[in-house]
Image (cartoon, helix red, strand yellow):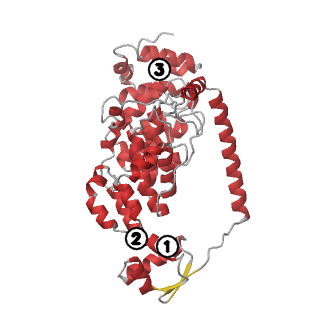
Amino acid sequence: MSLTNLEDVVTAATTVTDSAVLANALRNFLKRDVAEHLLASSLPDDVDPLAILNPTTNTLGYLYVLTARLEQPGAAIQLAPQIYAFCEGCSSTPLAYVSERVNTFVNRLMRQPNLPELLEALAKFVQRYPHKRDVFTMVHMVFLHACVVTRQYQVALPVLSVPMGSIDKTIYPINYLDNLLYHYFGAFVYIALKRWPQAEEFLEMVVAAPIASSIPSAIQMEAMKKLALVQLIRHGTLKSLPRYVPQMFTKSIKQSPYGQLAKAYPAGNLIQIAEKEAKVFTQDFNFGLLREVLDHAPRWKLRMLTKTYLTLSMSEIGKEIGMEDGKVLRALVEDMIRVGEITAILENDTLTFIDEKPDFRPEDVEKALAEAQRQCERLALLDQQIGRSKEFLQKALKERDSGGGGAWAGHGGMDEELLWAEDLQGEGYV
């Protein structure tokens, strides 16, 4: 099939039922120097092709025309209704044949000045694009990047709520860096929303990702710094990393200002360390997280008291944790009781600690067992996929035979990896 003009494209998009044939024809048409210009133009009598095409039944044609119109920054302001119509109504099956055009579409959206207003549409598109919702694509990473740079963190939650359980590089090409950035941006979203358990999980995924030779990615090193701070907030100390994580991460943190802070936490000279190393935390874009760590220190001091005392007066607690303002102290104690950080009763000016007793409801147990079963099924599927991967098996055997401890996955150059850093500069946690 040969397409020579926009009328041919619209005709093919509305009549050809074989998505593979149509995708190949559109791909060949795009090789022409004037293809983008033709796709962005109008039909005879100034008819808008997007008014003829249906985003659901004519997904490929709609995508190619809409993407061409988005080539110019600012075009999305007038095209917002069409963008929403496409993102909410497109069909995933034909999109599997044109991943390169999908990536162009998403990248052009990223350059639009009204990107914040388009994120809801992009979130719907991310969930409709792959043939299964748990299949990871480059679009997932770009979407989270968009949420971070626009600080629209809540919009990312529906996408992040679906665990990425599989990949299909034959349909949705991705690379090592896409995986790192997806989890790094996801962690950033959770940090901004103060969802510490999820932030810790995503940062650990970045740090635990395989590394080429013995040199970790710059993103992994930055993630390790954030992970250390998140662990102080969540656990009051640094937690041991899984055994398969290279020891260089732990050593680098212990020998840095982050290690000094962790060693003194929560009762040491934290302010002195923060002031002395302020330049380091600021250059790492972690000063906001550092403030959270310092704000959580009194909470961890109070939690440590539960291991020593059964009853304490508010004045005694104030002296122990270094908090003189009685109103602020009472508010802190009441909040910690409310959120379950301590199990205690506050009567008048006396705080009585209570031994925690686990409370498991039958429905909670059933829910946990069901989730464990789903995770086992997902791991079994991944194990089958890895077992069929010729690339993985060949490189794993090479590593075994050479005695190396490095992993098989490769990644981009250092310059490329550092491009994300300036995009994240701003207020708050960066």
Residue 395 visible somewhere in the drawing: yes
Vertical arrangement, residue 88 with respect to residue 230, above or below: above
Vertical arrangement, residue 291 with respect to residue 354, above or below: above
Pointer 3 residue: 10
Residue under the point 58% across and 29% down: 400
Amino acid type of the residue tagged 2 in the rendering: Ala
Q: Position of residue 55 (x, y in %)?
A: 51, 31
* For marks 1 and 3 on the same chain, the one whose residue lies earlier in the sequence: 3
Q: Position of residue 364 (x, y in %)?
A: 69, 61
Pointer 1 residue: 304
* For marks 3 and 2 on the same chain, the one whose residue lies earlier in the sequence: 3
Query: Do residues under tags 2 and 1 come within 8 Å of each other at their CB atoms?
Result: yes
Q: In which quarter of the image is residue 356?
A: bottom right
Which label lies toward us, 1 or 3? 1
Q: Where is residue 271 in the image (x, y as percent from the top left)?
A: 31, 67
Pointer 2 residue: 267
Q: In which quarter of the image is residue 171?
A: top right
